[in-house]
Amino acid sequence: MHPDVVVVGAGIIGAACAQALVARGLDVVVVDRCGPASGTSSAGEGNVLVSDKEPGPELELAVASRELWPSLAEDCEWEEKGGLVVATTADAAEPLRAFAAKQRAAGIDACELTAAEALAHEPHLNPEITAAVHYLQDAQLNPVKATRALLRGIKVINAGVSTTDGRSVTTSTGVISCGAVVNATGPWARHFGVNVLPRRGVVLVTTPIPGRIRHKVYDADYVGAVASGDADLQTSGVVESTQAGTVLIGSSRQRGGFDDTIESKVLKALARKAIALFPMLTDVPVMRAYGGFRPYAPDHLPIIGEDPRTPGLWHATGHEGAGVGLAPATGRLLAELLTGAAPHVDPHPFRVDRPEVMV
Amino acid sequence: MRIVVVGAGPAGMAAARTAADAGAEVTMVDAEPDAGGQFLRGRAKFSHAGVTHLRNTEVWLVEGQSLHLRAPEPRLAAGAAPRLLPFDALVIATGAYDRPLPFPGWDGPGVITAGAAQALAKQGVTLAERVIVAGTGPFLLPVATALQDLGATLVGVYEASSPTRWLRERKAILANRHKIAELVGYRKVLTHLETRTAVIAKHGSRVTVAKLDRRWNPVSHRTEHADLVCIGYGFLPRTDLVPSAKRTNDFLDVDERQQTSVENVYAAGEVTGIGGADLAEAEGVIAGAAAAQQEPPREALEAVREGRLFAQALARAHAVQPGWKTWLNAGTTVCRCEKVTLEDLAEATSMRELKLTSRVAMGRCQGRICARNASELTGIPFDGQRRVIAVPIPLGELADLPEEQS
Ligand SMILES: Cc1cc2nc3c(=O)[nH]c(=O)nc-3n(C[C@H](O)[C@H](O)[C@H](O)COP(=O)(O)OP(=O)(O)OC[C@H]3O[C@@H](n4cnc5c(N)ncnc54)[C@H](O)[C@@H]3O)c2cc1C
Ligand SMILES: Cc1cc2nc3c(=O)[nH]c(=O)nc-3n(C[C@H](O)[C@H](O)[C@H](O)COP(=O)(O)OP(=O)(O)OC[C@H]3O[C@@H](n4cnc5c(N)ncnc54)[C@H](O)[C@@H]3O)c2cc1C
């Protein structure tokens, strides 16, 4: 076996890279120590969002991805449900409108709604909201099914990778030599030389209440929490239903290594914020809580490109809380760079030799 | 020294009593109104001056050195019961629940678990006219007896395993003669006992009863009529409160002092293995003593040693055999909450992936009933169940949680 490329990690990012490389005619093998979507990619809500990103390189990547997903997400519960971002205090109304105006200028479909219009879209929403913006491009899919769909027809080996020199990988079941290696190990990517750290998130899942919540609805303070570099717990209200009728409630952000203990203060904060958006949730039971580790780079930008220190070693990681939304364009960009084709988005902001990234 | 015991079955009561006798300040918490647990409920008169018994109180999360409590039925709430209960040592004695195996019709009306039947029988509920009890293990007999005592007509008690398996367990039998003697109490139902037999389908009141080979593959079948089928194929421990404790086959691992792999957390009774009420009680005595930093009594240690022989023999003689997987057809429900059938179980490499692609084990019971079965049906390794919220809780209650104490 001597594939052109070995992709390490069968999460949504590794799967998207493998798919894009195979689409360009390369022979690809994926290696994962626990199997497809066994890491962060099975721990998220599966949103494909443009609404939470301010104009800049990440938004560009998100828009490119949003265009690619529908043709890739066959049988993945793809739903163009739209996002509804609301301000819940008087002070938060103006910043939300200004943020939406900037996004509109960058080509995003962001419609301001009156409270009455917002309530027509989401009848159970708290009528006390002070501003609302409807994002038509926001969508959702099942990330586990999407990972599987991207990997269709691609060989996945169940093994852990200990080291790589860019021309081979040493796995728990032997050495595979190859033309190039892609590090797509998500929150564990630091092991292969880039400064990616875990940022914990917890999601609450309720018993099914089909049809009551229609969009992804979140509090405008979410954007601030995402962008923050603070290690302490941050929460904001993010509420939506799945096709099974359950309601997913996030979101929390916390740094502290790979500690996966669930704390009651996180449950409490999430519950409060969800009820503030939808008071009717008060009586709805939560049946499970789960969490995962978002892979983040200190400057909050994905890392996509070749490692200048180890030719042949490529990185595709650091997508933090947006890996599902950013996967197809990441895979495509990586494949373009690796095959010497013209990139469809500017790769410069995602390069590996950023001071915050090289470790 | 504050010791909290979760569960007021034979194990929990013994632990609470022993720890209190050793001078500890003991609180025993149980979701039910009466002490006694699965088997002795209604018959155990628990009272001990040194033990505060919090009834109708559910523990849903262990966080650091505190338990989060709630009232499952607010109208029964125990007055000003605390919602946060600190402890220096914790004894988990939460027992187990029985495992159903799926077959065509098991998700329809008239099929319940043996444990549920026993609980209803204790309340004096007459369930049905014609009853079948099917499964494996000696605990089917008291259930059948209870139903018969309530006036039900016992169509049959079907044991899937073969009694000859027990002949190889001479050591266990000698050490536990009293357990065998217990059987005599069930002689009224023994005449209805058929071994190597199982219910493999139920449509309305028509029940398909099969004779099985050693590996539980059906070799012949006949039709019986029954309104109610009670099933129990062994037990699954209730271990949600200590998700990080080490376990084997989902039962909590304990050392000779009943301590789990988590510091200050002990476990006793069916959460550690299935061996009957006596073993549960002896383990409770040891856990209570150890939690209170005392030497466990020699007799209890000896009883546990002998009881474990019996428990291991029980596990061997009544191990679920793979032939059950042939009882299902493509459209047979595997997960009742999410209505997932055998053919819906997609290809996957981990339980997590299986759940998220097929929705098996994602419903209200959170896989308590079906996850183990789905794992065996697909060959995907059972990963143990880590449920951080032990019971469904309304969001309003979470929003109103007490602030952390330090
Ligand atoms: C609570 C929560 C909610 C989220 N919600 C969303 C959302 O709605 N939308 C969105 O776009 N994003 C969301 N995210 C973020 C998203 O889940 C991640 O950005 C994305 O899953 C990252 O994918 P990945 O492939 O890089 O990493 P992973 O999915 O973690 O994949 C990495 C893989 O590498 C394997 N691996 C690691 N080390 C090795 C090794 N040495 N050898 C072999 N294999 C190895 C692992 O087993 C794993 O399968 C959320 C995250 C969390 C935690
Ligand atoms: C159908 C059936 C028949 C049986 N027949 C026999 C028999 O004939 N002879 C015999 O020796 N054994 C029999 N057993 C086994 C019997 O259940 C055990 O021997 C014994 O009850 C085990 O005791 P325990 O203390 O470990 O658990 P249990 O008796 O099950 O007690 C556990 C207690 O913990 C409480 N609890 C659990 N979780 C929580 C929580 N989160 N918060 C608060 N409270 C909680 C429960 O309400 C319960 O009262 C039978 C079991 C079953 C299911």
Image (cartoon, grey):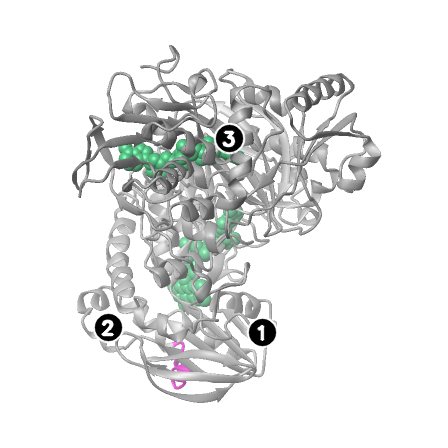
Q: On the image, numbered disc 2 is attached to which residue?
A: B166
The quadrant in which residue A271 appears is top right
**Mark 3 residue CB less than 8 A from any atom of ligand 1:** yes
Choose mark 2 or mark 3, whichever is in front. Answer: 3
| The stretch drawn in magenta includes residue B173 | no
Q: Position of residue B201 (x, y in %)?
A: 46, 79
Q: Position of residue A220 (x, y in %)?
A: 67, 25
Of the pair A198 and A304, the residue shown nearer to us: A304
Identify the disc placed on residue A76.
none
Q: With respect to residue A273, does B197 lie above or below?
A: below
Q: On the image, numbered disc 1 is attached to which residue?
A: B109
Q: With respect to residue B10, does A284 lie above or below?
A: above
Chain ID for label 1?
B
| The stretch drawn in magenta includes residue B186 | yes
Chain ID for label 3?
A
Estimate the spatial distance between the alpha carbons at disc 1 and disc 2, rounded to whole Å: 34 Å
Question: Could you tell whether A331 is left or right of B162 in the image?
Answer: right
Give the quadrant of ligand 2.
bottom left
Of the pair B33 and A223, the residue shown nearer to us: A223
Q: With respect to residue A119, does B230 lie above or below?
A: below
Magenta residues, start to end: B185-192
Estimate the spatial distance between the alpha carbons at disc 2 and disc 3, rounded to whole Å: 58 Å
Residue B138 shows in this picture: yes
Q: Residue at x 68, y 24 (%)?
A: A104
The amino acid sitting under disc 3 is Ala
Q: With respect to residue A236, does A20 lie above or below?
A: below
The amino acid sitting under disc 2 is Trp
Extreme top residue here?
A355
Choose mark 3 or mark 1, whichever is in front. Answer: 3
- Indicate the secondary structure of the residue bearing disc 2: helix
Q: On the image, numbered disc 3 is attached to which residue?
A: A322
